[in-house]
Amino acid sequence: MENRRAFWREKVVLITGASSGLGLALARHCHAAGARVGLIARRVELLQAHCEELSRQGGRCAWHAADVRSREELERAVAALELALGPCEVMIANAGIYRRTNATCWATAAAEDVFAVNLAGVVNAIGCVLPGMVERDRGNIVAISSLLAFSGYPGAAAYSASKMAVLRLLDGLRIDLRKSGIRVTTVCPGYVDTPMITDRERAELRSLVSAPIAAKKIAAAIEAGRPMLVFPRSMYWLLRLAGLLPYRLLDTILGRQPELEETQTSRERPSTGIEEHGD
């Protein structure tokens, strides 16, 4: 416990997608450990309520509304939060969205939304803080990818591709920054129990992890400077082993899996689910 608090004490942590789901769980965890937490998302009412909740517990917290798809909005949000809290020391690019992109009823607009939030949103978040970290030669860059980055999945072509792009983006950053004081951590969760998981999925999905437990795992990986965190590991190894199968066999096996459900909320805003994120 003391080591955890020593790492996070007074550290400025900015989190995108912080109004619900995993983003909110991360904000609560880091704040409880002594960090100064900056919440970024689109839903003003929730941001304000969560920031007031954290502030009542002591410590410092601030919020600023922004759509991660807009570089200009995110830059204004980060600038305001750094003015209030100090230079960003940990950026957790968490905001993400799941939209069905089944090839039999292809929706280009849905695929564009997925890449705009899941990939461009991560690029924008990192771009707001990385130059300052390089100048100071310290910091942590964290982004939420997914176990589906390691495999295609029915109805989730755009989602899987966007998460693989995030994985490779952070791989490259980690290599470039290997001789610096900046640590890069890629997080690849499986199913995380958030408001974007439907009741049916909550009852049927295996290896469902609660948001607070997921946040604790992620925080521990950041503290340790781990380059990658995957969980649950059983699901990770199944996907990696499946990738060794001949394509026809792999396509047959995965093609029998049910598509992930898309809720009304996921169509309205950046969100959570496998989809393990928040807005």
Image (cartoon, rainbow, N blue to C red):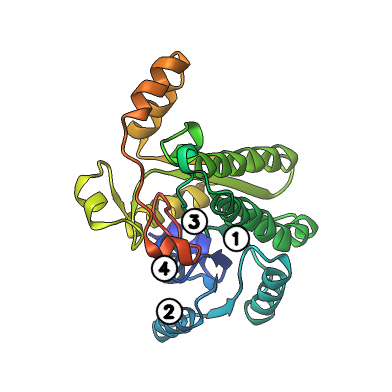
Disc 3 from disc 2: Cα separation: 21 Å
Mark 1 burial class by Cα count in 10 Å: few <14, some 14-19, many 20+ = many
Return the residue nearer the eye: 251 or 104: 104
First-in-chain label (3 vs 4)? 4
State the SS at label 3: loop
Q: Name which quarter of the figure residue 78 lies in.
A: bottom right
Question: Mark 2 highlights which residue?
Answer: 50
Q: Residue at x 71, y 65 (%)?
A: 71
Disc 4 from disc 2: Cα separation: 9 Å
Direction left: furthest residue: 203
Q: Are marks 2 and 1 in contact (CB under 8 Å)?
A: no
First-in-chain label (4 vs 2)? 4
Direction right: furthest residue: 135
Question: Closer to us: mark 1 or mark 4?
Answer: 4
Question: Closer to us: mark 2 or mark 1?
Answer: 2
Residue 44 higher or lower than 145, as above or below: below
Disc 3 from disc 1: Cα separation: 22 Å
Question: Mark 3 highlights which residue?
Answer: 97
Instruction: Please name the amino acid that badge 3 sits on.
Output: Ile
Q: Name which quarter of the figure residue 3 lies in.
A: bottom left
Q: Are marks 3 and 4 in contact (CB under 8 Å)?
A: no
Instruction: Please name the amino acid that badge 1 sits on.
Output: Val
Instruction: Please name the amino acid that badge 4 sits on.
Output: Ser
Say which mark, if any, is on residue 90. 1
Mark 2 burial class by Cα count in 10 Å: few <14, some 14-19, many 20+ = many
Mark 4 burial class by Cα count in 10 Å: few <14, some 14-19, many 20+ = many
Return the residue nearer the eye: 190 or 113: 113
Disc 1 from disc 4: Cα separation: 19 Å
Please say whether residue 256 is visible from this viewpoint: yes
Disc 2 from disc 1: Cα separation: 19 Å
